[in-house]
Amino acid sequence: MNDYDLFNLSAEDILRDDLDKLGDEWRLLRRLSLPDRLNNSTNARVRYAAALDVETTGLSAETDEVIQLALLPFSYEAETGRVLEIQNARAFQGFREPGVAISEDARAITGITPDMVAGKSIDEGAVLDLLKDIDLIIAHNAAFDRPMVEKHWPAFAEKPWACSLRGVNWTAEGMSAGKLDYLGMKFGWFFDGHRALADCEACIALLAQTLPISGDRVLSAVRKSASRKDFLIQALGSPYHAKEKLKARGYRWRPDDLPKGKVWWTITDDFEAECTWLEEEVFQSAVSLPKVEVTAYNRYSQRIWD
């Protein structure tokens, strides 16, 4: 539980006395209303993070561009994972006119039109000022957001990142999907998504929740995942006939039109064990593969391919 509520109304404000007898036969969803403070400090070590979200011209990290950027800073306790103050007064949101057309799908999802971004630009100085005391950037699907912002603003490459989508085993917590709006509904709230700042607010609200099975704070689980050291494995020169075996193990194909492409790859926390599997199941011989460390400073970034 948090010290302060995420909603303007409590269930007791709108329910009749007899409705509580229905028990599990109904659920109440309330509109998210993020306050300026969720918890009071317990004198634990306080750190500062920022939720980030972008809206873009499309889904390609290589060819599409950011049209809206939002950052919402907040403080938290490192030991407990409790979200403390949401710094709404410092929230940043801005439009940016792209160099490519906004796709029809992006316009339909976000409602952002060319007229809304015409002549607009992001104040890089304002972004840098907000980031200077931030020790962690968190996005819900950082694998999409991080490459997008690093193309435009190099300062984002200098910060450690975490992901509230991939940083939690949502399936193990009884969730059938990881989308932000779905997770919000499972925790009892809804929000108007697909606008960058609203998604940042929802991300912070999610980080403040307690996971239903493990009992961990979402933020604690996300930070623990971010602190791991993993390794990029590239199955260079793997035989064509092994592709189904690689796919079944979770390897992904990097197309040949990308830098260091035309290769099956994965991320693992045990480089030696994965090399042994490749030698036995794919190459049938000893191999020497490049070893690329993946940490919070390059995870989800295209820079792991540099």
Image (spheres, rainbow, N blue to C red):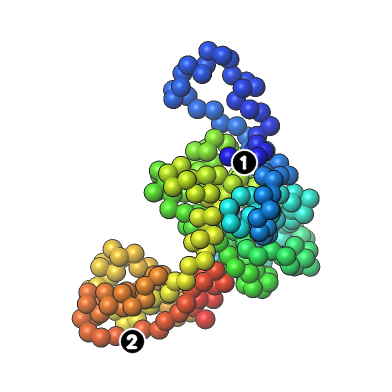
* Image coordinates for residue 2, horizontal then vertical, percent: 62, 41
| For residue 142, side relative to residue 241 (left or right) | right
Q: Label 1 sits on what residue type?
A: Asn
* Image coordinates for residue 36, horizontal then vertical, percent: 73, 44
* Image coordinates for residue 285, horizontal then vertical, percent: 22, 84
Please tell me whether residue 7 is drawn above or below residue 83 in the rendered image: above
Q: Quadrant of residue 64?
A: bottom right
Q: Quadrant of residue 17?
A: top right
| For residue 163, side relative to residue 100 (left or right) | left
Of 198 and 105, which appears nearest the observer? 198
Q: Is residue 30 visible?
A: yes
Residue extending farthest front: 43
Q: Is residue 110 visible?
A: no
Q: CA distance from mark 2 to mark 1?
A: 50 Å
Which label belongs to residue 288?
Answer: 2
Quadrant in which the N terminus appears: top right
Residue in the picture at 48% in, 67% down: 228
* Image coordinates for residue 99, horizontal then vertical, percent: 67, 66
| For residue 170, side relative to residue 195 (left or right) | left
Q: Dot 2 lies on which element?
A: loop
Which label belongs to residue 41?
Answer: none
Residue in the picture at 75% in, 49% down: 88
**Residue under circle 1?**
2
Residue in the picture at 47% in, 24% down: 26
Please tell me whether residue 1 is drawn above or below residue 256 in the rendered image: above
